[in-house]
Image (spheres, rainbow, N blue to C red):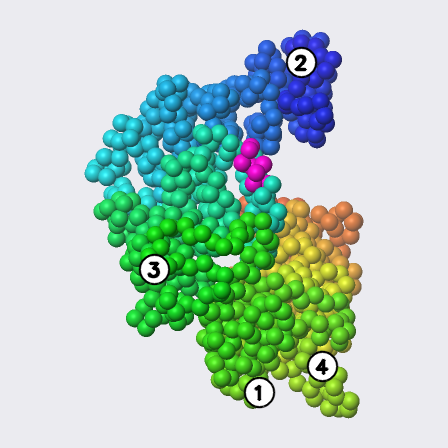
């Protein structure tokens, strides 16, 4: 191989002002190391040097050779051959680093690097290297749609040629076949210019052959495959495929019966993701998770210049909308923040589209999941953006809402006429789900807006009459809907005249909210919230939305006595008022003033009306509870439960401070019945509700959670103690100081978190928790004086590799205890593994103080593993004896004794094995074991004496020829809980011996 050059070759293109990043420096170091090994070496010396180096630094050598292959075409063949010879992991290291390199840096690759990458992939496919299919997947992501530049066309054609050449290899990977079909179906749409006709025909032939020959595999692509097939339906080969799909489906696959089978299958997110390059994906994810509403225009303008500036790139908008709809599903926390929402990004993509065809495809991409929506299979997050785009565009961009509603009405009869009823059912199911999940409280303001032209409103009413109004004049959400002529309007709000024909009314004020903060956009929705309330309450509702205070909420609720609003309207109002309220935050030891500040948000005003006999009366109390039930159903505000607990604790502390007399202060009650009534009305189990509320509290403030713990476990002890989810939430929140605080409260008898019942299930579940969480759990268990007997059942199932935290804690508990038959039974039920020293460590520690007792118990345990020879086989076991359904086998006992023997030999102390009881049990085990066990434990059985025991030692036994079981009885007759005493008594042994003599 050629001598190393003075400067390393370049993987990436970089400008003069760009510094080398960590990845580039790493590959250059690896390349220089590789060159230092092979410079001026013969072929044999090269192989020897590489083999020696790869044993010590496998990854460094592999990366150096990979860089040589990617940057030096003249050395690539020889270097690849050497790489396959010296690799120690089947090229796994190379493939993993190659995939990361492609995903992170492909766009910066030199042209030489790109060519060599394709060469390397082709060679690995020819050699059937395991894992190369994932590299192919990652490369295909850079075959971008909406891009007909020479570099992209070269990549598209090169990958296609590789697959055509290696079709037999491709057929081994069904998922990759689906990726290939999905990718090239999308690319064929863009290759419709004369210069690309040859390439397009090659793509068409290959994709058609894949679909027809592997139709059972491509069926899993789901409904988006049909969407892409629609775009290429005019190509003759695909037209014929459509004919077969619709009229002769079984000719494609015996299990394929109808196109509906595909349309009802949701496309996997991995395929939707695959049609954006990793760079585009990162930018869109950043836009929807980091950029604040009102500051997003410059990011969108940059994105537009970078990816959507050419006429060909307009088709990329559909890919982006499908990605946003199907892949980006923000958390509730993100939905409630001022980060730019998905609907705003989609609205921007729709309004900046310059092609009518691309605009139609973009609208189809937005509504595609609506057409055959099934609430049981599909996700509401896939239909939410479309309804919110229409809802929010109504103010500033009514033309967008109008064109989307028009599209939704027209798609029902025109998507596929024989399926018109099914499409209508899918869209109806979507709208029903939107109402049930409270994405919008009411659809009538959208479907019957005065900003829509008369003809469109008539079409929408006829198409979606069930969602406009019912026979009682109520909208789909159950809120009384007033007719258009009677709807109140502000003085500046534009309205259509009766004979207005212009679909886009001229609006007097600037209603473009693209540059407004999200909070201001939400503020513009206030009239809709207030309009759902009785007229007398609307001014108070506006005040509440402005002040967002408990005082404003109290004034509104007090006024509800005369005009009672619906629970739905009240829930919408308080959800909007509470969304931007500051979360509960307190110090570790909050002051009264600090606590009072925390209960000034609107939600706390509602709690004042929950007490029976409160000022509002029972009617208002039920209205508040019904409102909470509606808020929970909306799933938009999750802080009611833990806010109620926090409120009850604040009231409890306030009442205690108000009592000067110490005796009366002790009698102040925590009003837990309010929380119980709340759970009962919402049909919640108290324990599960506490766990959910603590989980939400954990997200806001750990100090508040710890502050609530003593009172919750005191007032709801039957439901809270040993509740696994609740406990997990607590230990996952604690830091060391908070853990110490809970331990101190436990020692003061002010906290009781556990009970002995069902503790085994709780401990078993905790084995999968994080290390510190388990540490906290065992510290709390120790503080509660949980007995060793309570944890014994989990000892056999603890793995020394996976459950080190629990094993260590149990080992320390055993260290504080004493040996007993129950404990030894569970210890010896553990699987014998060479690295697991848990059993041996426990026994050897006990031998320091209780060697005689340990020896007796072990001897009894081993002897009773051979019931056919034991004199106690007819005895009725006592309560501490080994139950017949879970005894350790003889092999397990011998295995642990063998481990103990090895340790005793190393410590040069065999005293426990020299005990007479141990000798007799070993002799019994040896005489009754199989030949294989004798060979396996030959060293252990060598410890058994073959000669008779000394007379003086035998004379100390109650029965001269009894087995160790009787021996154990006499030694521990004074021990009340001795297992051996209950298994056999000396008198019984004599009776049995006499009976044998009589029969003789």
> In the displayed structure, would residue 789 be above or below residue 327?
below
Give the side of residue 903 with respect to residue 679, left or right.
right
| Element carrying mark 1 | loop
Q: Identify the image quadrant of residue 592.
A: bottom right
- Distance between mark 1 and mark 2 Cα atoms: 92 Å
| Element carrying mark 4 | helix
Q: Are marks 1 and 2 in contact (CB under 8 Å)?
A: no
Residue 899: x %, y % from top left: 67, 50
Residue at the spot x=41%, y=70% of the render? 479
- Distance between mark 4 and mark 3 Cα atoms: 61 Å
> In the displayed structure, would residue 982 be above or below residue 209?
below
Give the side of residue 136 with respect to residue 690, left or right.
left
- The residue beneath circle 2 is 46
- The residue beneath circle 3 is 498
Residue 430: x %, y % from top left: 38, 56
Foreground mark, 4 or 2, reads: 4
Looking at the image, which is closer to me, 664 or 201? 201
Residue at the spot x=52%, y=64% of the render? 526
Evaluate whether residue 377 shows in this view: no
- Distance between mark 1 and mark 4 Cα atoms: 19 Å
Residue 919: x %, y % from top left: 67, 57
Foreground mark, 1 or 4, reads: 1
- The residue beneath circle 4 is 654
| Element carrying mark 2 | helix
Q: Which contiguous range is marked in magenta? A: 299-306
């Amino acid at each position: 191989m050629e001598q190393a050059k003075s400067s390393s070759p370049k993987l990436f293109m970089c400008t003069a002002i760009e510094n080398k990043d960590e990845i580039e420096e790493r590959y250059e170091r690896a390349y220089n190391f590789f060159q230092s090994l092979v410079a001026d070496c013969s072929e044999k010396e090269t192989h020897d040097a590489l083999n020696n180096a790869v044993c010590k630094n496998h990854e460094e050598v592999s990366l150096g050779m990979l860089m040589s292959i990617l940057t030096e075409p003249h050395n690539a063949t020889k270097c690849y051959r050497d790489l396959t010879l010296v690799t120690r992991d089947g090229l796994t290291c190379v493939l993993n680093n190659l995939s990361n390199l492609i995903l992170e840096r492909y766009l910066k690759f030199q042209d030489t690097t790109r060519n060599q990458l394709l060469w390397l992939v082709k060679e690995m496919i020819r050699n059937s290297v395991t894992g190369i299919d994932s590299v192919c997947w990652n490369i295909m992501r850079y075959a971008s749609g909406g891009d007909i530049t020479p570099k992209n066309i070269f990549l598209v054609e090169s990958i296609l040629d590789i697959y055509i050449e290696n079709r037999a290899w491709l057929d081994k990977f069904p998922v990759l076949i689906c990726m290939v079909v999905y990718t090239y179906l999308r690319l064929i749409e863009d290759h419709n210019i004369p210069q690309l006709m040859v390439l397009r025909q090659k793509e068409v032939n290959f994709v058609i052959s894949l679909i027809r020959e592997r139709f059972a595999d491509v069926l899993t692509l789901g409904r988006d495959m049909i969407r892409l097939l629609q775009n290429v339906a005019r190509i003759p080969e695909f037209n014929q495929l459509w004919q077969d799909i619709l009229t002769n489906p079984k000719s494609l696959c015996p299990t394929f019966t109808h196109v509906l089978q595909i349309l009802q299958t949701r496309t996997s997110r991995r395929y939707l993701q695959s049609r954006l390059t990793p760079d585009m994906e990162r930018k869109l994810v950043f836009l929807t998770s980091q950029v604040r509403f009102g500051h997003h225009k410059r990011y969108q303008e940059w994105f537009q210049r970078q990816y959507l500036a050419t006429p060909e790139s307009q088709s990329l908008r559909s890919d982006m909308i499908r990605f946003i709809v199907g892949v980006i599903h923000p958390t509730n926390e993100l939905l409630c923040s001022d980060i730019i929402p998905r609907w705003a990004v989609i609205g921007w993509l729709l309004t900046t589209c310059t092609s009518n065809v691309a605009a139609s495809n973009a609208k189809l991409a937005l509504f595609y999941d609506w057409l055959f929506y099934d609430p049981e299979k599909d996700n509401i997050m896939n239909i939410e953006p479309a309804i919110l785009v229409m809802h929010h565009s109504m103010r500033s961009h009514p033309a967008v809402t109008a064109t989307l509603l028009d599209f939704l009405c027209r798609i029902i009869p025109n998507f596929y006429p024989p399926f018109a009823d099914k499409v209508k059912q899918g869209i109806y199911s979507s709208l029903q789900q939107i109402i049930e999940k409270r994405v919008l409280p009411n659809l009538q303001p959208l479907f019957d807006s005065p900003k829509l032209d008369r003809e469109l409103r008539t079409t929408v009413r006829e198409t979606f009459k069930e969602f406009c109004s019912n026979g009682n004049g109520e909208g789909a959400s159950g809120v009384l809907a007033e007719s258009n002529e009677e709807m109140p309007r502000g003085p500046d709000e534009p309205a259509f005249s009766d004979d207005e024909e212009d679909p886009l009314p001229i609006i007097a004020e600037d209603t473009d909210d693209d540059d407004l903060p999200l909070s201001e956009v939400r503020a513009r929705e206030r009239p809709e919230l207030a309009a759902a309330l009785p007229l007398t309450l609307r001014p108070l509702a506006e005040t509440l939305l402005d002040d967002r205070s408990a005082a404003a909420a109290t004034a509104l609720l007090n006024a509800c006595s005369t005009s009672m609003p619906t629970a739905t309207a009240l829930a919408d109002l308080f959800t909007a008022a509470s969304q931007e309220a500051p979360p509960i935050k307190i110090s570790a030891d909050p002051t009264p003033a600090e606590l009072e500040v925390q209960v000034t948000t609107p939600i706390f005003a509602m709690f004042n009306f929950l007490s029976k006999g409160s000022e509002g009366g029972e009617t208002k109390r039920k209205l508040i509870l019904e409102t909470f039930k509606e808020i929970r159903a909306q799933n938009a505000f999750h802080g009611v439960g833990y806010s109620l607990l926090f409120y009850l604790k604040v009231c409890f502390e306030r009442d205690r401070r108000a009592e000067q007399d110490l005796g009366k202060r002790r009698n102040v009650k925590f009003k837990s019945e309010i929380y119980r009534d709340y759970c009962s009305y919402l049909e919640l189990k108290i324990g599960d509700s506490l766990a959910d509320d603590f989980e939400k509290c954990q997200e806001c403030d750990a100090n508040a959670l710890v502050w609530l713990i003593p009172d919750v476990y005191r007032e709801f002890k039957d439901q809270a103690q040993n509740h696994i989810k609740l406990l997990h939430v607590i230990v996952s929140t604690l830091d060391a100081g908070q853990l110490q605080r809970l331990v101190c409260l436990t020692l003061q008898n002010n906290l009781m978190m556990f009970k002995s019942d069902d503790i085994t299930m709780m401990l078993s579940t905790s084995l999968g928790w994080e290390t510190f969480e388990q540490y906290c759990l065992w510290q709390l268990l120790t503080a509660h004086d949980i007995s060793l007997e309570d944890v014994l059942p989990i000892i056999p199932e603890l793995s020394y590799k996976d459950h080190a935290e629990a094993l260590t804690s149990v080992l320390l508990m055993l260290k504080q205890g004493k040996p007993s038959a129950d404990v030894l039974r569970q210890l010896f039920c553990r699987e014998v593994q060479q690295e697991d020293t848990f059993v041996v460590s426990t026994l050897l520690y006990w031998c320091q103080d209780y060697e005689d007792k340990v020896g007796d118990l072990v001897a009894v345990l081993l002897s009773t593993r051979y019931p056919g020879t034991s004199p106690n086989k007819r005895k009725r076991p006592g309560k501490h004896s080994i139950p017949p359904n879970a005894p350790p086998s003889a092999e397990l006992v011998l295995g642990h004794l063998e481990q103990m023997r090895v340790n005793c030999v190393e410590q040069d102390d065999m005293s426990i094995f020299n005990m007479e009881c141990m000798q007799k049990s070993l002799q019994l085990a040896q005489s009754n074991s199989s030949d294989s066990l004798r060979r396996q434990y030959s060293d252990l059985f060598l410890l058994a004496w073959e000669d008779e025991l000394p007379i003086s030692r035998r004379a100390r036994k109650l029965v001269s020829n009894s087995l160790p079981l009787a021996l154990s009885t006499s030694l521990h007759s004074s021990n009340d809980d001795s297992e051996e005493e209950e298994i056999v008594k000396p008198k019984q042994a004599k009776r049995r011996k006499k009976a044998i003599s009589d029969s003789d």
